[in-house]
Image (spheres, helix red, strand yellow):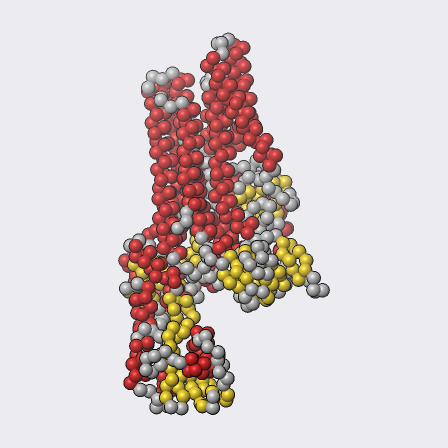
Amino acid sequence: MSTEAPHASHHHAADACCHGDHDHHHAPATAAAPAPGYGLRLRIPAMDCAAEESEIRAALDALPEIARLRFDLGARVLAVDAPTERWPAVTEAIEKAGFEAQPIEGDAAPDPAERRREMIRLAAALALACAAELLHFFAPGTIAWHVAGMTVAAVAIALAGTSVLRKGWKALLAGRLNINALMTVAVAGAFVIGQWPEAAMVMALYSLAELIEARAVQRARGAIASLLALAPAQAEVGQPDGTWALMDARAVPVGARVRVKPGERLALDGHVLRGRSAVNQAPVTGESLPVDKRPGDEVFAGTINDSGALEFEVTRPAGDTVLARIIGAVEDAQAQHAPTQRFVDRFAAVYTPAVFVLALAVALGGPWLAGWTWPAAVYKALVLLVIACPCALVISTPVTVVSGLAAAARRGILIKGGVYLEQARRLKTIALDKTGTLTRGEPVLVAGVAPDGAAPSAHVARIARGLAARSDHPVSKAIAAGLAHEPLPVDDFGAQPGRGVHGVVGGQRHVLGNHRWIEERGQCSPAVEAHLDAHQAQGRTMTLLAGENGVLALYAVADTVKDSSRQAVAGLKAMGIQPVMLTGDNPATARSIAAQVGIDRVEAELLPEDKLRAVERLAADGPVGMVGDGVNDSPSLAAAAIGFSMGGAGTDAAREAADVLIMDDDLRKVPETIRLSRRTHAVLVQNIALALGIKAVFLLLALRGDASMWMAVFADMGASLLVVANGLRLLRWRG
């Protein structure tokens, strides 16, 4: 399993639990495909759990030149992003901490044969531990059988726990009470007082539980790691001589021509040069339907070319594709501790030493205060030590948060940290920008009408399209795109800035312009004014076509509401969250759009600083989320408790501006994020209650003398597996 984080000082509860995930990144990258920049790669044979990771991280804190660390505990490999000249210092610092470090190259994935050997070793240890129990219960009570039972138990302990005992001894010498130290004391103590069958079983079960939990945690990380497999390793690149050749995607330069056949995945980002096809962008943006692509359109690495062959020009290197940035965003998110995780780590750091002291008090004070025999008191203390393991508590939070972040990423929602995943559930108000957030952000022809209220004739429409098609103005472009009629040829074409365009069509001069120009020409009438008033009340921009004898048609252009906006607003209201529109547009347009989507509260004609003040006012009633395009809205996005950016797959500014990035511009992802936050919080509460509840029950049983070491290790193992399985359920979340 891989973990990654920017290099920083971390001192949390990783020492308290060997198979938990803590203050580091749970990176999606695999050892087989390290991210660019990780030049130094070291195999560390003794590094197989979070306790060792914490020690190594602490040892490297003194080297500020290290930019990032990536831990692959399954392969026992550390990748270091640091200047080449500092590599010897890195290796020396790790070795000073007591770990052997071997530089490696190439594939560092865990060897399947080694994994099989590990499973066989643990199975043999468990079988021998069972044999030791059977000998203890059924063998004759002679010295020979007693020695035989002890020997079988000792072999089981050696097979299952040599590494644990060695690391536990080192931890005790260093004064650290981590899980290895607890298990070492418990197993050694049980063996010394004659409970060797239980010592063997505890070690075998503990090692087995650790392996199962590690695999389960790896599944959560693998949900993001699978993103790496979306982009193929090779691309078919055009050569100077006109041929095509397969190249490593990482070696393809920006500007190269790449060809992708139907059914293949794209290896890189680019702009289409030739061909038309439908592209399935769901792996990157979460869009449910394929998107039609034609020359000039943008395509993304990891997406699937469904129908036709495409040629595209590479616009970003492999390490900077949208897919690579998604992975980087999730890595950065996983590096951050969520509030619940920080609380759990602080609690575990106190809990383990406290129970250790309690166990010591039971062992020393039990015979004096409760009249227990010394062996009975020591046994109760050892049971307490096993129960003291905080693994279930510590592992429950990160596996839940990682699963939640992975589930969101699969849906095209990039959450930049566990803190935002947790805090989104607290939002009381969502402030929404209008243009580009609630609306499409581009003008569209929505209506055409003749002065008498009828639809314009086909001939009139052909005149309008002929004039509009010659103009570069966005409103004219919208009219030309919205009219399906064949344009008539235009002679003597010209433009009047601030008014419109004119030209001769069919021997007569026509103008296509705004209301002011038609008034100046003296061609307005009560019927025309009535149509203008009706459409402008809905926030539409009006353009009029007039000939020499009067107005022929009126065309209404407007920014249309996204299909998802109404459902998103309804979803927010259903959760008890108040939607508020904040826009720089005029009040009439703002009210019209708000009415279409179901928003009751509107603030219009706001400059960016006005939006900022509006968000601050709204915050008086509770935490506020802001949804915007991430550019003009950046001050208010930063001021909000959580900023949601409708970034789109290629918008770099949006990625930087907000805490949550909606990849496919679907506003319904905002209420989805809040629902996921509420679900994640519920699972976190369940896991903490499970872990603490089971510990509390067995703590009381142990103090009463009703719990054995068997029961204690099963309680620890069962609680850990329960909370991990419960957290992993979030991977199946579908909104």
Does the rendering let one see residue 66?
no
Look at 47% across and 34% down and name the residue there. 178
Look at 30% across and 61% down and name the residue there. 618
Q: In this view, does 226 lie to the left or right of 358?
A: right
Q: Where is residue 13 in the image (x, y as percent from the top left)?
A: 44, 39
Q: Which residue is situated farthest in the front direction here?
A: 458
Look at 48% across and 9% down and name the residue there. 141
Look at 36% across and 25% down and name the residue there. 702
Please tell me in which quadrant of the rendered image residue 688 appears: top left
Q: Is residue 704 above or below residue 453?
A: above
Q: How many callouts does the rendering have? A: 0
Pick the residue in front: 351 or 681.
681
Q: Position of residue 604 (x, y in %)?
A: 32, 70
Pick the residue in front: 173 or 160.
160
Pick the residue in front: 259 or 353.
259
Q: Position of residue 316 (x, y in %)?
A: 57, 61
Q: Where is residue 706 in the image (x, y as percent from the top left)?
A: 35, 22
Please tell me in which quadrant of the rendered image residue 557 appears: bottom left
Does the rendering let one see residue 547?
yes
Q: Is residue 672 above or below residue 345?
A: below
Q: Is residue 329 left or right of residue 550?
A: right
Q: In this view, does 293 lie above or below 453?
A: above
Q: Is residue 101 above or below residue 668?
A: above
